[in-house]
Image (tube, grey):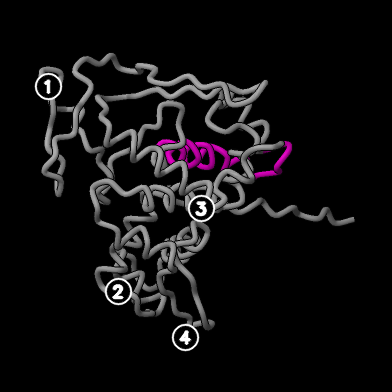
Amino acid sequence: METRRHRSPTYPSISLKDAIERAGLFFKKEGKHKATIATAAAHWGYSATSSARLTTVAALKAYGLLEDSGEGAARQVNLTPLGLSIIQDERTVSPERDASIRQAAMLPKTMADLWSKYGNELPSDDTLKHYLKVDREFNPNAVSDVIRIYKENVVFAGLGAKGGRAETSIPIDPVVDPEDDTLADKVAVPVAGNTKPDFVRSSFAPGEEIANVRVSRDCTIRLLATGPYSRKSIEALVAQLKLGLDLGTYDDLVSE
């Protein structure tokens, strides 16, 4: 009797950071227009026959950045509204773009599954590999890539415990530059487009807890800062949280 081969679950072949960079390259060449797979592949530096062109398209689709239409050689792709909302938003501080990035990070089913089970409190890699291979029936050769991409997405999207964000070509730097060694001696710094100075915390310890709020009988939310913060950055945080609520970002991440 022939044993039925179980197909491994799908997962994006590249991280969200890399996917957004690919989307940016596509937008630079095509804008909001459609293009064939072969043309898109050329924008990304792939040949028309490279297998990477198809896995990259699949990854961008999984993150909700790209959509396709047609079949075979006539198959075309274009950026989605979500992809455009990220690529076209060039503001230094943008709660809307940050919310879109968080949404995209967990759109792939495998990423959402890991977030639902572990969030950013991950067990050892051995435990993760066991879960993916045994419970989720992944190909053993794929589990290391799945774990790496998940970890990168959590950090890049600011879903980590300390809200860190990896560097990217998309301008998402904080209002205050944490690399500025003279910042601790400053009383205030001007914010672009605002003549009123934005006052900055004059002394700061990395990982400083700036809020500890009990929100229910069983839950307390702690807010940690990884760099100097200001009133403007707190307002940006509040705006991000409110936008997340409006978009339903947290609806599937918590249980009543």
Question: Disc number at residue 30?
Answer: none
Whichever of callouts 2 and 3 sits on the residue coming sooner in the sequence is: 3
How far, Cα to Cα, is label 3 from label 4?
24 Å
Could you tell me how far apart the alpha carbons at marks 2 and 1 are, in whole angstroms? 40 Å
Instruction: Give the amino acid type for the residue marked by disc 4 in the picture.
Output: Ala
Q: Are marks 1 and 3 in contact (CB under 8 Å)?
A: no
Question: Which of the pair 119/138 is nearer the observer?
Answer: 119
Q: Which residue is mark 4?
A: 74
Label 2: how many Cα within 10 Å (few below 14, some 14–19, many 20+): some
Task: Tell me which label, 2 or 1, sits earlier in the chain.
Answer: 2
Which residue range is magenta in the image?
133-155
Badge 2 is on which residue? 31
The amino acid type, in three-letter code, at marker 2 is Gly
Q: Mark 3 highlights which residue?
A: 12
- Mark 3: few/some/many CA within 10 Å (<14, 14-19, 20+): many
Looking at the picture, how far across and down is residue 64, in whole percent?
49, 61
